[in-house]
Image (tube, coloured by chain):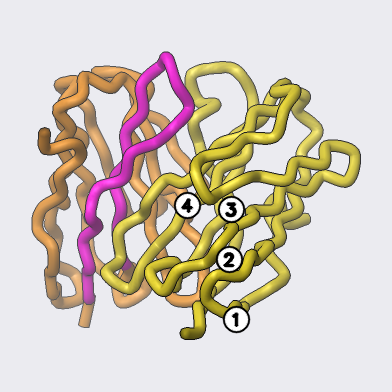
Chain colours: A yellow, B orange
């Protein structure tokens, strides 16, 4: 089974509107974390936000928030007030466990977001 | 503040050639890893290291070798390049005190 599933290959959003990018995950480990990374057309991987499985509140970083629904195993990224510079590929990723190898990341296939002027 | 650096940025190899992709970080991070990114896919883990002298395999290790003789450097060796290794390669590092991973700019490798 896929560990990370991103079901939206492409999304469009109007500038200044909010957008939600979906991510579902599959793990049996009680200790895990979910990440979102942004990859613009220049190719670098930019860390956006992190949510640990034991964190009580949803993570927020500026215009980014993570809608973490543990029972549904979903970790959707919400971008508020979209900007043209938000156009990029977005990847959801997961780490599992608490040992030294717990930093291994499993990535989804990504969602290409296009912000329209 | 250099962060994670990778060299070269681009490389073209012929089938059967060997080469080393370089990765260095100046943040004194214990954990380092190599990923490959193929078109239309997310990144997949090749090898990782939890500290100097310790390495282990990830999801797609075949055809690659790593070593970690210092905290700063984590080179990835392609033993005998194959067209299936055409990809973009990313190095990443992380501290033991936080889960965030910092990625290098990537190396685009083409094997003909």
Q: CA distance from mark 2 to mark 3?
A: 8 Å
Q: CA distance from mark 2 to mark 4?
A: 12 Å
Report the front residue among B44 and A80: A80
**Mark 2: few, some, or many residues within 10 Å (few <14, many ≥20)?**
many
Indicate whether residue B101 is drawn in magenta: yes
Mark 2 and mark 4 in contact? Answer it, CB < 8 Å: no
- Secondary structure beneath dot 2 equals loop
- Secondary structure beneath dot 4 equals strand
Mark 3, residue position: A92
Residue bounds of the magenta highlight? B88-110
Taking the image as shown, residue A67 lies to the left or right of residue A35, namely: right
Q: Earlier in the sequence, mark 1 or mark 3?
A: 1
Q: CA distance from mark 1 to mark 3?
A: 18 Å
Q: Position of residue B70 (x, y in %)?
A: 15, 21
Instruction: Same chain for labels 1 and 3? Say yes or no.
Output: yes
Q: Earlier in the sequence, mark 2 or mark 3?
A: 3
Instruction: Same chain for labels 3 and 4? Say yes or no.
Output: yes
Q: Earlier in the sequence, mark 1 or mark 2?
A: 1
**Is residue B21 visible to the viewer in this orientation of the structure?**
yes
Mark 2, residue position: A109
**What chain does badge 1 belong to?**
A
Image disc number at residue A12: 1
- Secondary structure beneath dot 3 equals strand
Indicate whether residue A60 is drawn in magenta: no
Q: Nearer the viewer, mark 4 or mark 1?
A: 1
Q: CA distance from mark 3 to mark 4?
A: 6 Å
* Residue at left offset 90%, top offset 38%: A71
In the rendered view, tell whether residue B60 sits above or below residue B11. above
């Amino acid at each position: 089974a896929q560990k990370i599933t991103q079901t939206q290959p492409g999304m469009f959003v109007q500038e200044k509107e909010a957008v939600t990018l979906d991510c579902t995950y599959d793990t049996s480990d009680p200790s895990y974390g979910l990440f979102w990374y942004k990859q613009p057309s220049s190719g670098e991987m930019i860390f956006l936000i992190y949510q640990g499985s034991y964190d009580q509140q949803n993570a927020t970083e500026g215009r980014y928030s993570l809608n973490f629904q543990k029972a549904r195993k979903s970790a959707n990224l919400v971008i508020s007030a979209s900007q043209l510079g938000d156009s990029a590929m977005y990847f959801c990723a997961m780490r599992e466990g608490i040992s030294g190898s717990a930093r291994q990341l499993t990535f989804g296939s990504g969602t290409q977001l296009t912000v329209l002027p | 503040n250099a962060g994670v650096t990778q060299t070269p940025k681009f490389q073209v190899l012929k089938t059967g050639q060997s080469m080393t992709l370089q990765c260095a970080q100046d943040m004194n991070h214990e954990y380092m890893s190599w990923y490959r990114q193929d078109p239309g896919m997310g990144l997949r883990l090749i090898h990782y290291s939890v500290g100097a002298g310790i390495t282990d395999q990830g999801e797609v290790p075949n055809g690659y070798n790593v070593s970690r003789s210092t905290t700063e450097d984590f080179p990835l060796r392609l033993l005998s390049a194959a067209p299936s290794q055409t990809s973009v390669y990313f190095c990443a590092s992380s501290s033991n005190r936080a889960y965030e991973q910092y990625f290098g700019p990537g190396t685009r490798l083409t094997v003909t």
